[in-house]
Amino acid sequence: MKVQIAASILSADFAALGAAAAAVERGGADLIHVDVMDGHFVPNISIGPLVARSLKRVARVPIDVHLMITDPDRYIDAFASAGASMISVHVEVLPHLHRTVHAIKALGVRAGVVLNPSTPVIAIEQIAGDVDFVLVMSVNPGFGGQAFIPRSESKLREVREALDRAGNTAASIEIDGGIDRSNAALVVAAGARILVAGSAIFHSSDPEQATRELKAAAVGALATASPAL
Ligand code: DX5
Ligand code: ZN
């Protein structure tokens, strides 16, 4: 399994999203990560399907939508038709997670489930065989620019074990929050294969170069962690 960089446009200049996407693509970003916040599940409000659709029009890489909203079932169709290739939903808000995951897949979109820092891995035990990916939050969702929570490293290993136990070796693990060059190797060694980064990319003076450097750190770590790959 390759390692990928998902550039979170939450930390970009919203007046120039097209240019932001182009810069990270030049730097080697594999995905554009779109953070959707409703001011209810998380304290912040961000963007919705209209912006995802506009990004889809200009982006050359797939759109990865992270729904930090109380009622994701109501908006899955809208994000799928906006052009999302991946949609992830928080386990904390979904009593019928199995139905939601399969509803996402039925739309031809890769389905992911997200764990907040305080949510135990056992919460995905029964869905581990159904998902395309698991997103481990390494900060409390709502804002960019927060510090990586160290406990997330062992959580990544636990999630990998849960997926493998379910026979879902093809499912990948995404990590989101406080990712930068200093911890990229650590999270890759623990099993992360999609690294989300917002402020490490867009709050740097050169987002294209920051993306390139983060990707090099992640790819280098994978080569060290799994020399056979
Ligand atoms: C946080 C979002 C993240 C955020 C990451 O709620 O889910 O995707 O943009 O930003 P950084 O990389 O700055 O922690
Ligand atoms: Zn996110």
Image: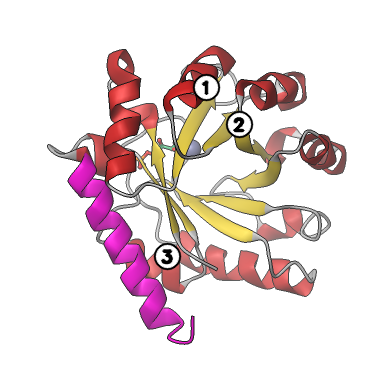
Callout 1 touching callout 2 (CB < 8 Å): yes
User: Vertical placement of 84 versus 125: above or below?
Assistant: above
Label 2 near ligand 2 (CB < 8 Å): no
Mark 1 residue type: Ala
Residue 145: x percent and y percent? 30, 37
How far is the residue under mark 1 from the one under mark 3?
Answer: 28 Å
User: Vertical placement of 142 versus 92: above or below?
Assistant: above
How far is the residue under mark 1 from the one under mark 2?
Answer: 8 Å
Q: Quadrant of residue 93?
A: top right
Residue 220: numbered disc: none
Is 96 displayed left or right of 197 in the figure?
Answer: right
Residue shown at the point (45%, 56%) measured from the top left: 4
In the rendered view of the protein, which quadrant contains the N terminus?
Answer: bottom right
Circle nearer the N terminus (1, 3): 1
Mark 2 vs mark 3: give the one in front: 2
Tell me where the magenta segment starts and ends, as one range: 208-229
User: Vertical placement of 92 versus 226: above or below?
Assistant: above
Q: Is residue 189 visible?
A: yes
Residue 187: numbered disc: 3
Residue 117: x percent and y percent? 53, 49
Q: Which residue is mark 1?
A: 52
How far is the residue under mark 2 from the one under mark 3?
Answer: 25 Å
Is 44 displayed left or right of 134 in the figure?
Answer: left
Circle nearer the N terminus (2, 3): 2
Q: Which residue is mark 2?
A: 84
User: Vertical placement of 14 versus 171: above or below?
Assistant: above
Q: Dot 2: within a 10 Å radius of its alpha carbon, few (fewer than 14), some, or many (20 or more) residues?
A: many
Label 3 near ligand 1 (CB < 8 Å): no
Residue 127: x percent and y percent? 80, 54
Circle nearer the N terminus (1, 2): 1
**Dot 2: element:** strand
